[in-house]
Image (spheres, grey):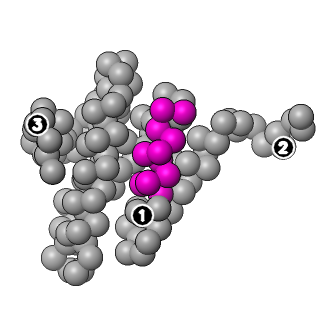
Amino acid sequence: MNKPKFNCDTKGGIMVVSALRYALGRYTYVPGAVQDWITDHWDNLDSNTRCVVVRDVFEYLYDEYKRDLSADSPFGDYDTKTWEKFSVERCRSLDSDELKRLEAEINGVKERGVWYKETIVPRLQQQSSW
């Protein structure tokens, strides 16, 4: 087996996070494809990648909430709801240590922490939010 040329993970976490970050905010088939792939491979992703995926989507949703882009784009509201559903479902599958780590990062910015508690936590507590 060849030694990796770059000092990064060899299990593909960097590729997953890169694809996710590329897909966020796109109004094409790419977000759905990335969400489907991550969902299908979720149990095989390492803990760090799982936390980063959920955190990055929550940060994207918070930024959308602040900018209220859904009013400017016919796709914005649909995409925001799709990303919200995806991230809440993924968050529900985090173990308690992963969830603590995620919440510490989200709550690192006061306004984002308030948004998380008011918007995401109630969805996490619902049986099914969709």
For residue 48, say whether it is visible.
no
Residue at (47% x, 67% y) in the render: 30
Locate residue 94: give its quadrant: top left
User: Disc 2 or 3, which lies upstream in sequence?
Assistant: 2
User: Disc 3 or 1, which lies upstream in sequence?
Assistant: 1
Q: Position of residue 104 (x, y in %)?
A: 31, 28
In the foreground, 18 or 86: 86
Quote the CA–CA distance across marks 3 and 1.
25 Å
Q: For the residue marked with disc 3, what is the amino acid?
A: Gln
Q: For the residue marked with disc 2, what is the amino acid?
A: Lys
Q: Which residue position holds label 1?
A: 31
Q: Which residue position holds label 3?
A: 126
Q: Main secondary structure of the magenta part?
A: helix
In the foreground, 108 or 37: 37
Q: Which residues are magenta?
A: 34-44
- Element type at marker 3? loop
Q: Which residue position holds label 2?
A: 5
Q: Is residue 74 above or below residue 17?
A: below
Query: In the image, is residue 41 part of the stretch drawn in magenta?
Result: yes
Residue at (42% x, 54% y) in the render: 35
Q: Are marks 2 and 3 in contact (CB under 8 Å)?
A: no
- Element type at marker 2? loop
Q: Position of residue 125 (x, y in %)?
A: 12, 32
Dot 3 crowding, Cα within 10 Å, few <14, some 14–19, many 20+: few
Quote the CA–CA distance across marks 2 and 1.
29 Å
Q: Nearer the viewer, mark 2 or mark 3?
A: 3
Q: Position of residue 87 (x, y in %)?
A: 31, 46
Residue at (26% x, 43% y) in the render: 88
